[in-house]
Image (cartoon, coloured by chain):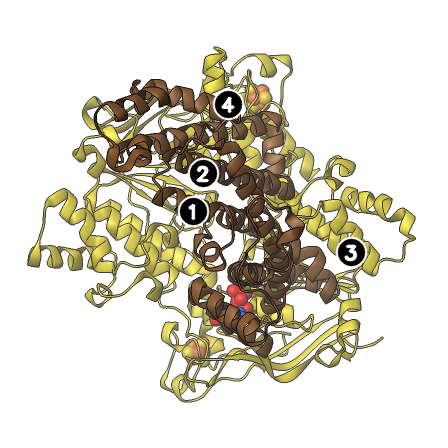
Amino acid sequence: MTGPLIDIRNISVGFTGKSSATLPVLRNIDLKVNAGESIGIVGESGSGKSTLALAAMGYLKSGLRLMEGSVAFQGQDMFARTRTELEQIRGGELALIPQNSGQSLTPTLRIGAQLVEALRLHADVPEAQYSAKAIELLGQVRLPDPAAIMTRFPHELSGGQQQRAAIGMALAGEPTALLLDEPTTGLDVTTQAHILELLRDIARDRGMAMVYVSHDLGAIARVCDRVVVMYAGEVVLEGSTRQVLKTPIHPYARGLLASIPRLSDPRLPVALDGRPPAPGGAGQGCSFIDRCALAQDGCRTSRPDLERLPSGEAVRCFHYQEAHQLSLTGSGAIPASLDGASPSALHLDYLAISYRRPGLYDKVLGRDSAGVPTVDGIEITVAKGETLGLVGESGSGKSTILKAIAGLLPPSGGKITVAGGQALAPEVEHRSPDHLRKIQLIFQNPDDSLNPRQTIAQILEQPLKLYFGLTGDALHQRSAEILDRVRLGAHYLDRLPSQLSGGEKQRVAIARAFAAEPDLVLCDEVTSALDVSVQAAVLDLLNDLKATQGTTYVFVSHDLAVVRALSDRVAVLYQGRLCELGPSADVYAMPSHPYTEVLLGAVLEPDPDTAPTLSADDVVELSPPAQGCPFQRRCPRKIGRICDTDTPPWQQGVKDHTIKCHHSIADLAAAQAEGAAGQRA
Amino acid sequence: MLAMLLRRLFLGLVTVWIVSMIIFAGVEMLPGDSCTAFLEREAKGKLLENCREAQGLNRPAAERYFDWATSAARGDLGISANGEKSIAELVGDRLGNSLLLAACSLALGVPLAIFLGVVTGLWRDRPVDLAVSTLAIFAMTIPEFVSATVLILVFSVWLGWLPGIVLTSASAPASEFFPEIILPVLVLTMVMTAHILRMVRSSVIEVMAGDYIQMATLKGVPYWRIVFWHALPNALLPAINVVALTIAWLLGGVVVIEVVFNYPGLGRMMIDAISDRDLPVVQAIALIVATVYVCVNLSADILTMFANPRLRTLHMRRG
Ligand SMILES: Nc1ncnc2c1ncn2[C@@H]1O[C@H](COP(=O)(O)OP(=O)(O)O)[C@@H](O)[C@H]1O
Ligand code: SF4
Ligand code: SF4
Ligand SMILES: [Mg+2]
């Protein structure tokens, strides 16, 4: 076969809106994927990435309709094939790895049964060898103990293991092309880095083509040869990974890159204001016009074509030659930070938290079943006006600690004191109204935390009535003021949460927390559900509020670069135990604890010239070891028995930088330098 | 797993125990007792005292509750107020009849409801769905005595195909209830099918829109295999609990149907006992219905636990 493997020509896909007009979700898209080539599709959520990838399989979600164009796989039109032909190709020559394997594996079928099904449908293996072949596939995706995994149900695997099982299933039909829809979104950094390496290896060994859909430019940089940038259902930029990520010539691509927080840059990322037009909402001009710094009158009246340049790039912009004026990094605000000593706002005194309470039976039998606590020995002081970042993989106890501070989860040991040395009651019911007001919690998902039936006004008035007894005009005026502080106009007051975008909802959640005029704000993954451009705006807002109100934050995120952007100090957690604690600048510049080194090494930067260092396995530990160092089972620098038996001591570095390890910081620095030299050689 | 089962069983027993206290207390609070009911107008002075003495009604309430509860636990439900028959025997016949009615309705209704629920769910908003769903809404909203009356009118009065009321005596063997039982079974099946099918339909729709169904489609799994292998085991799980509730309803809550058709089941016995102020019988029936309710819910929970791998493994890990 000559010609491209996947050939998408001028497709437009749409759905019928309320006014019975057809609203386009994809507009005139061309995409060619050659055998063995790996293409990234990036863009904000709702830009049509998933729709495009699924269209390559001849599949449209219910409600969507192909308006024009064609999709060919191996030269044959996918939308003209019969159901039986499609069933042959899908999962066979052309396989999909879904975004969320936890939800994409059938919950009532064992992993083995689902793999065997894929083999039965697509593989050229005799029936008797199905299970041997399935075990082989699970081994190829580097799952430990494949035979045992076969008998598990999907929910018995961790997120990373589910994703690996899904990859194994996709490989069953020996595909020539893989479509991946956000395959690592929601996974831990270390897991993500391992999965991406696995995909790279597999694609290279088998000469598979990949279409990799992601909003994460770091992942794209690692696996893709070419990148397509989508905006509001159109391709706005296409080029080699290097061209798109290093010298993008479309204003949107530049804005997107600038809004990503970087490990290497202490400044806040630059927000890309505004939001993309809804399907059918783009005017006759350029769809990016409302957010574009280069826009001119001509952009409003006619829509730019996708222009193919001699350099191999394709760009949809009249003024792409001026795009280089837009900065890619670095014009963001310097994070507000406190100087000099400041009184303590929060002190965690050997905090321990255990989810498993001794049950009735255990009490009757006098058994101590609480076991090893989930979180233990947390000893941190946060100064007034300071931001403490908490980082660690999922399950490391970040949210647990926040819940204990907020009183939602009584600690099983230790004490929590606030400003002035007052101890906080463990349960929220026993806290004074004043304490309740002073500590506010903001959650990851505003959809869960905002009552969908209350208007924004009602949501904001609650704390104002409760804590300040405001009524009537004063109440209304104050709500409007607070909303203004999070940069939303007073006209939002009458709206319902469902009428707001994700970023706007999160601002309302922030506004509600700040309505209580808190001293301490606990942020739990507050930007994780948001697009990067929106995330940058929320980070900027939080930073602003900190500068003007002198608020103290405890900021939790699994995204290390986000934490870096906002925190003065950072605490690294593993299995509910502290590993490293110090000023952000020092910890990020010199990650000393072996776990911090592993964690930071796995971070993917949106730069094709960097590669992650994977020094430890991404096994998931279900519970911390009973004694010794919490990281003993995975530590690449483990000393020996002492790590298994003795709790490591605090080792002092410069200033307040400390780690908990049997190695000293100086030893670790020497070992790291040696490793780096070894790699270069 | 075993510990989990034992725990549920224990909780079920506690529930029945608490309910028995509530029943006893409730009947206790009613004005009058079985002696005043039995003696009617002569219920005064010496006669009343003697009667109470004979039935042990002048003892403290706690003592009487203890006696009642312990003998009930042994299966001895006492003697009805008019002192003729043992309640266990009276109620036994009626319970058997109610079970017969329930079993017939379930045997007909559950498979029908699941079939129709799946069909309407898969062909959502198509003619077959619109037709069946409309009928189901009718069956749910029309009061049972109306549909019962209409059926009697049509099949018994006009067409003369089936007997309209039950004349068989309460203690007759099951086989003698045919064909009299057919019309009551039809009415119950209609109502029950409507409820279960609505639930199955929405569950099928929800599951079919799920990520794993899309994934199976894009893995090249043929449609009907997706339906039977990937979708239905998940979609039917919630049906187990609805069926359990239906069973409980069939055994104690279908008074109207039993009255309309003169069917000698538990519900009608309860009504009769209430109007006769036969308090021991009222207590006994209430206790039986509560026990049945607890039992079917318990079995449904256990069945769900076995059928749902999530719950099963959760409890296995916990031991
Ligand atoms: N089944 C559907 N019916 C109508 N609109 C849809 C449907 N699925 C997605 N859309 C719309 O299509 C647009 C693109 O969606 P999607 O391809 O999922 O974007 P992405 O993967 O980039 O987040 C969005 O505006 C979304 O609301
Ligand atoms: S065409 Fe105009 S509005 Fe559109 S991206 Fe280019 S400069 Fe901006
Ligand atoms: S104490 Fe030992 S196991 Fe723990 S981090 Fe240090 S070297 Fe590794
Ligand atoms: Mg998507």
Q: Which chain identifier belongs to the yellow chain?
A: A
Q: Is residue B22 left or right of residue A37?
A: left
Which structural element holds mark 2?
helix
Residue A127 vs residue A327, the one in the foreground: A127
Q: Chain of mark 1?
A: A
Foreground label between 3 and 2: 2
Which amino acid type corresponds to the residue marked 1 in the rendered image? Val
Residue A327 vs residue B169, the one in the foreground: B169
Tell me what residue is drawn at x 46 percent, y 21 percent.
B70
Which amino acid type corresponds to the residue marked 3 in the rendered image? Ala
The residue carrying mark 2 has its beta carbon less than 8 Å from ligand 1: no
Which structural element holds mark 1?
helix
Q: Mark 1 touching mark 2, by CB under 8 A?
A: no
**What is the C-alpha distance between the residues marked 3 and 1?**
40 Å
In which of the image's four quarters is ligand 3 placed? top right
Residue A201 vs residue B79, the one in the foreground: B79
Q: Chain of mark 2?
A: B
| Percent of width and height locating residue B206 | 55, 60
Q: Chain of mark 3?
A: A
Q: Which chain identifier belongs to the brown chain?
A: B
Foreground label between 1 and 2: 2
